[in-house]
Amino acid sequence: MWLLRQLWRWWAKRFRPLSASERGRRAEREAALYLRRRGYHILAQNLRTPFGEIDLVAEKDEVIAITEVKARSSEEFGTPIEALRPRQRQRLRRAGEWLIARKGWQDKTVRFDLIAVDLDEQGNVVHLEHIPDAF
């Protein structure tokens, strides 16, 4: 009986649907891995600024990419790309400007990217799309 309980706990933990925060963390981790594989150097993850959080800050070929990661497990409420509302873009732009001023990156090329991640119920990546200079 004890073994059955342990197996059930293991199975339930492994195959239960992920919560929204778990999906977000998984998507950010997958996005960072994707960027690393393409030659980017990750400078920061989940960077808090006075204007909000920046998911990823990466650099490649002297270009700083301030990246927002959007994850979805279904398209019931729209695609990840549609989820980046104008207000969020404005917040991210302000946070990026604050970061640029703080780090002294005025002479560097900075762009705002979007990585859209589609996940299944267990958090496996179904599709990942990187949109450089998204806005």
Image: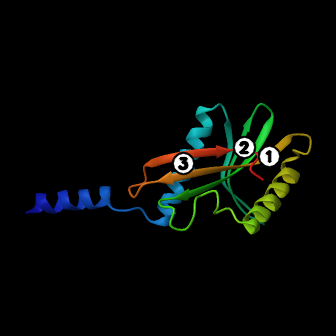
User: Which of the image's four quarters has the N terminus?
Assistant: bottom left
On the image, the x and y values in percent for residue 77 come to 55, 68
Mark drawn on residue 111: 1
Outermost residue on the right side: it is 107
Q: Which quarter of the picture shows residue 81?
A: bottom right
Kindly report which numbered mark, 3 or 1, lies closer to the viewer in this rendering.
1
Please report the residue visible at 51 percent of the width from the left and 62 percent of the height from the top.
75
Amino acid type at image mark 2: Pro
Q: Secondary structure at mark 3?
A: helix
Mark drawn on residue 87: none
The answer, for residue 82, to whether it is visible in the render is yes
On the image, the x and y values in percent for residue 29 come to 54, 48
**Left of 77 or right of it: where is 8?**
left
CA distance separating discs 3 and 1: 20 Å
Asked if the residue under mark 2 is in contact with the one under mark 1, i.e. CB atoms within 8 Å, the reply is: yes
- Label 3 crowding class (10 Å Cα cut-off): few <14, some 14-19, many 20+? some
Which numbered disc flags the more N-terminal residue, 3 or 2? 3
Which numbered disc flags the more N-terminal residue, 1 or 2? 1
Amino acid type at image mark 3: Arg
Q: Secondary structure at mark 1?
A: strand
Which numbered disc flags the more N-terminal residue, 3 or 1? 3
**Left of 99 or right of it: where is 53?**
left
The answer, for residue 50, to whether it is visible in the render is no
Disc 3 designates what residue?
Answer: 29
Q: Which quarter of the picture shows residue 120?
A: bottom left
Judging from the image, the colouring scheme is rainbow
Kindly report which numbered mark, 3 or 2, lies closer to the viewer in this rendering.
2
Amino acid type at image mark 1: Arg
On the image, the x and y values in percent for residue 92 come to 76, 60
Please report the residue visible at 27 percent of the width from the left and 61 percent of the height from the top.
12
CA distance separating discs 3 and 2: 18 Å
| On screen, residue 75 above or below 128 | below
